[in-house]
Amino acid sequence: MVSSSDRPTYTPDQLKQYFTYIDLPTPFHHTADSVQKLDAQEQLKFVATLIRHQLCKVPFENLDLHYSPVKGISLNHVFLFDKVVTRNAGRGGYCMQNNSFFGTILRSLGFSVMSTGARVSKQVDDGTAGTHHTEEVTYGGLGHQVNIITLTDGKKYFCDVGFGASGPTFAVPLENGYTAINTGTKDHIASSMRLHRGFTANNTHRNPEQELWIYSIKYGRADDDSKPWIQCYCFSETEFFPSDFEIMSGWVSTSRTSMFVNKVICQKFLMSEDGECLVGDITLNEDAIKERRFGESKTLTEIRSEEDRVGALERYMGVRLREDEKMGIAGFPSAIS
């Protein structure tokens, strides 16, 4: 029988390197032993702090599919630690890379972690996000990953550090109808999130055991009825194995219809001055790098060439590509000619 102990973990020294890399405050430099001595609320605060620092330091990006002499995606935990932490080059990954990496971090700290697959809403995939108030929307196939953790009080939360600017910014309790501020402050809410149980337009069986967790986001206050909830993705509490994510990642990283294959993506969040919340994001958006704070967007720089893009990634997002990586995009459709 496979147990959680058979899943890969990082060493205490690697955890220290990671904490330093993401600029985690020293009081939160825990070990697996010290985490077990925390009560559930202290554990939750620790995970929330970890997530904020991870989201601000480790970008949501797909540069391996474009800026690489050998195109491809690896979910290997040794590769991911080297890429994210050891190289110190501002790198991250797309959903299954970042969430596989973060799941291993949490497991190494002694948390009970179960990974599961998610389906992304067509509201996100086809660009219609925010244009209607449809209760049930259509979803694509399994192409995303989230982690579900169980704290010492038995309560479950889901964590996602790999969905870009629309993703949750903290550990979300698995509670039907849960809503909260996602980015911004109580006085200046930039976005809100909601988690509820329900069905998608794809469901043909409507019995209770087929209900799914549906994660949505709204730009602005949760109680602002003039703005729609954008359904982002849905998931169940069925455990997925590492081999499942390898198969899923294979399609996401190679299909000609995949957004990740056709477009260079890089995004990370921005922290508030007191470090207690996230207030916006900085994103590579086609021909520009844009910064959004408290819902207000501005262009930091325009991009007209490969030299512009590589330089902007380093200047504004801290991503430093090697020369062989810079050359790797030559001749590909995603290259700026």
Image: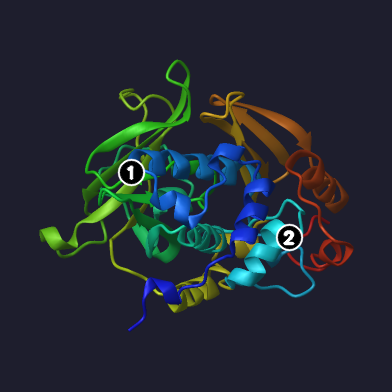
The type of residue carrying mark 1 is Ala
Q: Which mark is residue 92?
A: none
On screen, 318 above or below 306? above
The answer to whether any part of residue 167 appears in the image is no
Q: Quadrant of the N terminus?
A: bottom left
Q: Residue at x 67, y 58 (%)?
A: 84
- Depth check, front residue: 49 or 253: 49
**Residue at the limit of the structure toward the top, as seen here:** 187
Q: Residue at x 42, y 73 (%)?
A: 5
Q: Quadrant of the C terminus?
A: bottom right
The picture places residue 193, in percent across and down from the top left corner, at 37, 37
On screen, 315 above or below 76? above
Q: List the residue tagged with mark 1.
A: 40
Q: List the residue tagged with mark 2.
A: 86
Task: Measure the alpha-carbon separation of dots 1 and 2.
Answer: 31 Å
Query: Residue 176's image quarter?
Result: top left
The picture places residue 129, in percent across and down from the top left corner, at 43, 42
